[in-house]
Image: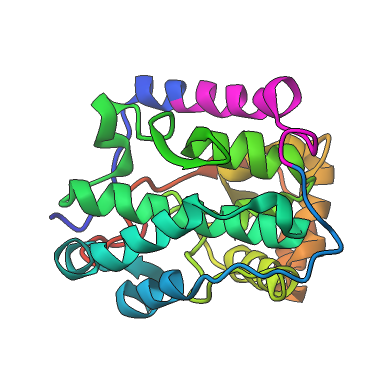
């Protein structure tokens, strides 16, 4: 595989932008609520994510070329039994018997585990965008729970963004791309949810692919353009929201005056062979 940024044709960029806008609208129009997915906030039941943690331990490559990568070839060859067992166990979890924080951690882990599975099964892959005839796999039915068959878009937009008003979700789910926030090396749980969301946000925001400046131009990840409404109601509010999530240096980069804001996203696969740009 060539060490290069995956270049997205202009028409595909338009389709991706339209898809992101549609996904954002999906939360208001088609998002699930607490009646669709009830929880027991008095519950002491916890969900066991040890098999997902084992997969992360074995196949996540932290800070490889400055970005957390995934050994998809190794996963495909040696790790699918463990990953499939984890996903099968998650399919049978009674989510109505656990708290909301356990539910959020569950869906973040399942989203990332399903993305691992989709990419590993198709490996070698240059970009997730090459799957499903160039549309990406996000609308493909991939997971079942509570007698509902769900796509990755269902999990991210109808569930995570629909049930929780939490912009840090965008730093937790991973789309198998260099431009995406890192896969965390620790499985999310109800207990570590708050601290791990905060850490994921801070780590991504301090990286140049999320926030950097060149003169008076502020370069931001396209995530903050596609999902601007999740972070604020205008560009200034988005920058202020991100500044509050980041460390002091990040906040300074975001709040300094800028003549222009430019957005970019690297869709190259987050495997070990490709270089970030």
Q: Nearer the viewer, residue 147 or 204?
A: 147
| Residue 2, placed above or below residue 234 | below
Image x and y of residue 276, in percent = 35, 60
Image x and y of residue 6, in percent = 28, 44
Residue 256 shows up from this direction: no
Q: Which of 33 and 203 is in front in this view?
A: 33
User: Residue at the location (58% across, 64% down)?
Assistant: 204
Does the magenta portion include 18?
A: yes
Q: In which quarter of the image is residue 38?
A: top right
Image x and y of residue 209, in percent = 50, 58
Q: In this view, does 77 lie to the left or right of 63?
A: left
Q: Nearer the viewer, residue 261 or 164?
A: 164
**Span of residues in magenta:** 16-37
Give the colour scheme shown.
rainbow
Does the magenta portion include 170?
A: no
Q: In which quarter of the image is residue 163?
A: top right
- What main secondary structure does the magenta stretch of the protein show? helix
| Residue 191, placed above or below residue 224 | below
**Quadrant where the image shows the N terminus:** bottom left
Q: Which of 251 and 97 is in front in this view?
A: 97
| Residue 231, placed above or below residue 229 | below
**Quadrant where the image shows the C terminus:** bottom left
Image x and y of residue 156, in percent = 58, 42
């Amino acid at each position: 595989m060539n060490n290069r940024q995956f270049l997205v044709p202009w028409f595909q960029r338009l389709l991706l932008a339209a898809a992101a806008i549609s996904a954002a609208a999906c939360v208001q129009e088609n998002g699930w609520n607490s009646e669709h997915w009830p929880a027991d906030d008095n519950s002491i039941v916890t969900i066991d994510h040890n098999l997902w943690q084992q997969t992360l331990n074995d196949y996540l490559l932290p800070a490889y070329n400055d970005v957390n990568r995934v050994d998809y070839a190794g996963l495909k060859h040696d790790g699918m039994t463990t990953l499939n067992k984890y996903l099968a166990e998650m399919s049978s979890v009674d989510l109505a018997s656990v708290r909301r924080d356990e539910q959020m951690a569950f869906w973040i882990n399942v989203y990332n585990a399903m993305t691992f599975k989709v990419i590993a099964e198709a490996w070698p892959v240059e970009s997730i965008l090459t799957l499903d005839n160039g549309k990406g796999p996000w609308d493909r039915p991939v997971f079942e729970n509570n007698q509902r068959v769900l796509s990755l878009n269902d999990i991210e937009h109808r569930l995570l963004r629909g049930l929780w008003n939490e912009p840090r979700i965008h730093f937790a789910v991973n789309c198998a791309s260099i431009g995406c926030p890192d896969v965390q090396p620790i499985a999310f749980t109800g207990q570590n949810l708050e601290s791990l969301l905060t850490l994921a946000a801070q780590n991504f925001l301090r990286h140049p692919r999320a926030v950097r400046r060149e003169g008076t131009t502020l370069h931001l990840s396209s995530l903050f353009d596609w999902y601007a409404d999740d972070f604020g109601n205008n560009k200034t509010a988005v920058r202020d929201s991100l500044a509050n999530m980041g460390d002091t240096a990040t906040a300074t980069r975001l709040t300094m005056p800028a003549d222009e804001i430019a957005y970019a996203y690297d869709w190259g696969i987050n495997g070990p062979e490709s270089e970030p740009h």
